[in-house]
Amino acid sequence: MKHRTQILHLKNGFDLWGARFGNPDAKIKILALHGGPGDDANEFIPWADQLQEFGGLDAEIYAYEQLGSFHSESPDFSKQTEVDKYLTLDRYVQEVDEVRALFGLDNFYLIGHSWGGMLTYEYMLRPDFAKHLKAGIVFSMTDNIADYVDQINQERLDMFGEQEVAYMQSIEKSGDFADQRYHKDLVALYKAHLNRDPNYNPDQGMAMMAEPVYNHFQGNNEFVVTGAMKGWDVSQRLDEINLPVLLTFGEYDTMPIASAKKSLAHLKHGRLAVTKDGGHSHAQDHPAEFFKHLGAFIREVEVDNV
């Protein structure tokens, strides 16, 4: 695997960690946005190799860690003035375009996972940014937060029943997230719906999460969004997107496929791919099918761009 790292110097004075993976001479360029919010970009390290192996495409993958994430610099989020200045959805969308320019990207593919999918939707909805894109790929993200909250709460109700959900809700109300019974339930839920790889360890997966970023946007748990993302909804604006768009979801995703189908009805050039037996991170738990779908979509776009 070929890779090059790059420090991305933002106009606000902070530095982000960035990297490129794959063939630098490849025609296909893909910028990947991680989730969280506040997660890391490790999932993208093997993507160039996997897209070639399973999708039959030669591409260069660009990835970076967003402001406040593990390998990038962070403002002092213990100060409310720093929170107000830097932890805004608009600033993170602006950051995507600044990173695009620093990487020297144009006529490229943008893919966002989860929170990164929210940023991808927002980027595509801004004409000054969208003009740089060939296409957008929304990887396990709805066009509104309410559908996600309904889905993940239904999944835990189906898994545990009303009595255990009531217990989990009591822990969430008290804030005692170190409770062992609650943690056991959370691990079971994550292994069923977040990442279905038998070797997945949810505790290791959260080890590098930037909690101030996550807590600000999401809240303190997955089941009730109380942070800045609450109420986010672009479902009524999808007809403004004139780009080819792939929505890729896992069969057992924390994001509802029914919501993706509703989105598809309003996208002018939309496609939907569902990874059988996949979870929210179906590029990791079922890479062969994920990259087969991604490769097919990119080939279709490339044909239309000839």
Image (cartoon, rainbow, N blue to C red):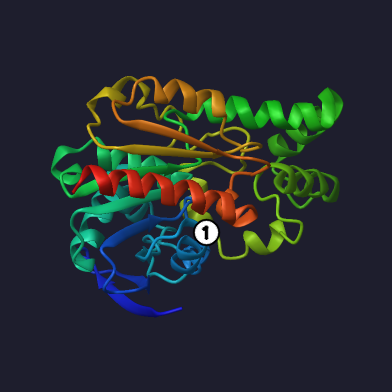
Image coords of residue 264 (percent x, y): 41, 25
Given the image, on which type of amino acid does mark 1 rest? Phe
Q: Nearer the viewer, residue 31 or 57?
A: 57
Q: Quadrant of residue 232?
A: top left
Image coords of residue 63 (percent x, y): 38, 64
Q: Is residue 134 left or right of residue 144?
A: left
Q: Which residue is mark 1?
A: 54
Crowdedness near tag 1: few (<14), some (14–19) or many (≥20) residues, C-alpha within 10 Å: some
Residue in the picture at 37% in, 70% down: 73
Q: Can residue 26 be spotted in the picture?
A: yes
Helix, strand or loop status at disc 1: helix
Residue in the picture at 45% in, 55% down: 34
Q: Nearer the viewer, residue 150 or 120?
A: 120
Q: Is residue 73 left or right of residue 106?
A: right
Q: Can residue 36 be spotted in the picture?
A: no
Q: Quadrant of residue 12?
A: bottom left
Residue in the picture at 70% in, 56% down: 202
Image coords of residue 103 (percent x, y): 23, 67
- Above or below: residue 227 compared with residue 59: above
Q: Nearer the viewer, residue 216 or 274?
A: 274
